[in-house]
Image (tube, rainbow, N blue to C red):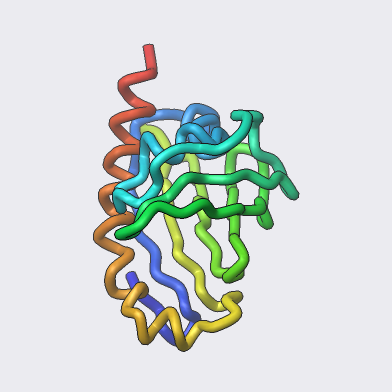
Amino acid sequence: MADIAERQVSVQREIAAPPEAIFAILTSPAGHAKIDGSGTVQSARGDDEKLVLGSKFGMSMKMGVPYIISNKVVEYEENRLIAWQHFGKHRWRYELEPTETGTLVTETFDWSTSFSPRGIELLGYPKKHPASMVKTLERLDEVVTSASP
């Protein structure tokens, strides 16, 4: 679902796993390459310490050409919410809501905090990202449910 007025796009998926198992993957920089549905996240740089509010972590990326990006965790609630941003200040957010059969995961691309929200819109990211986000949540589901006993 897209809300250009609020400058956010979100996708949701219910995953048959507890929030703690999903959060463990989201708070592991190495986990990001495993679940990325865009094909741009290559690998984590540095250690794989659990992310918390204020954590900084680097990622090796590739969008046409390889590059490195540094991120900072800017929103955090244990087993419920994590969001990070890089120098552009737009955010990637994951919200986890327990359900009777697992966890409802909402991934949001939020460019309302960006230095250049109009630039992001002109580049078409709000329309491009949801398809990759759907793939990310599919991969997250595969990774977390295959790791469950």
For the C terminus, give its image quadrant. Answer: top left
Residue situated furthest right in the rendering:
54
Q: How many marks?
A: 0
| Point 43% across, 79% down: residue | 120
Residue situated furthest top in the rendering:
149
| Point 52% across, 56% down: residue | 93
The answer to whether residue 55 is visible is: yes
Question: Position of 129 compared to 5: left or right?
Answer: left
Image coordinates of residue 101 in percent, x first then y, are 36, 33
Residue situated furthest front in the rendering:
65
- Above or below 34: residue 109: below
The answer to whether residue 100 is visible is: no
| Point 27% across, 42% down: residue | 138
> Which quadrant of the view contains residue 10?
bottom left
| Point 39% across, 69% down: residue | 9
For the N terminus, give its image quadrant. Answer: bottom left
Question: Position of 100 compared to 49: left or right?
Answer: left
Question: Position of 74 compared to 81: left or right?
Answer: right
- Above or below 76: residue 118: below
Image coordinates of residue 89 in percent, x first then y, are 61, 69
Front position in the image: 8 or 87: 87
Front position in the image: 14 or 135: 135
Image coordinates of residue 84 in percent, x first then y, are 59, 55
- Above or below 15: residue 41: below
